[in-house]
Amino acid sequence: MTKKRKKVNKGILIFEGIFVLLIGILIGAVGQDHFSETELIPVEIDNNYTISGQNVGTIKVPAIDNEGNGISTELIVMAEQGSGRTLVDIDNLLFWVDTQSSIRMAKLVSEEVTGMDLNNYDLTYSIGANASLIGGESAGAALALASIIALKDLEVKDNVMITGTANHDGSIGPVGGILEKANAAKDVGITLFLVPLLQSREVVYESIEHCENFGLMEWCTTENIPRKIDIAKEAELEVVEVGSISEALEYFIVEE
């Protein structure tokens, strides 16, 4: 039996190839638009600014102590002309060993936001009481902001506090213990508390004891009951979600 071969129209194949190519380009363009990294927006100040003496940036930082309670302290960054060194307060060495990564990230982000070459400046980081309890990445956003404030010698409000990690693209990442930190902020006179996106509300678990009688015996168990809470209502202060260091900086700067 003789098999018949089907003839393929080359014109149709070429048309289909071009069509598929165009679709691919369009999809790629849309994908790039939706998945591009967070754009850093430089603060609206003189990018030709240079430090002549010593600039100091100070902001309050929240944390959680060993018993799960919220505490707060001051984070201080001093900027001066130098050779790009990163210095730390030796009295608070425990804090800095646990936060080296956050400091490096803070310098990277602050350099991008300010447009300054940090190879020409030395930054000295110090923190007040309870230093060993402010470890980890949760102080990353505060470290970046304090660095920017010191580098640009900005005047900032004393009623604002922030919690969150700092990512390489300038975005702010999630942290834990938001409610406890908000309560600590309220206790020291903070009226505006900045949190990462989607963290102005959270689920907390309340432990209750449930008992039932079985004949002459009583059987008791501890149950964790979930409850959705609004951080602003629970802590009785204003809570604002921020997605980037640049956005958060706008809430700290004193309007001229």
Image: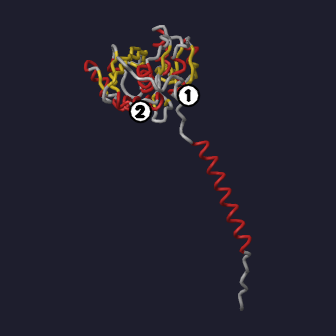
Position of 33 with respect to 75 (left or right) is: right
Circle 1: element type = loop
Q: Are marks 1 and 2 in contact (CB under 8 Å)?
A: no
Answer yes or no: is residue 5 visible.
Answer: yes
In this view, the residue farthest toward the left is: 90
- For the N terminus, give its image quadrant: bottom right
* Quadrant of residue 130 within the rendered picture: top left
Give the image location of residue 42, x and y in percent: 52, 28
Position of 100 with respect to 9 (left or right) is: left
- The way the protein has been coloured in the rendering is secondary structure
| The label number, if any, that marks residue 33 in the structure image | none
Q: Nearer the viewer, residue 122 or 72?
A: 122
Give the image location of residue 251, x and y in percent: 54, 18
Type of amino acid at the residue the image marks with label 2: Leu
Mark 2 packing: few (<14 Cα in 10 Å), some, or many (20+)? some
Q: Nearer the viewer, residue 234 or 40?
A: 40
- For the C terminus, give its image quadrant: top right
Q: Which residue is mark 1?
A: 197
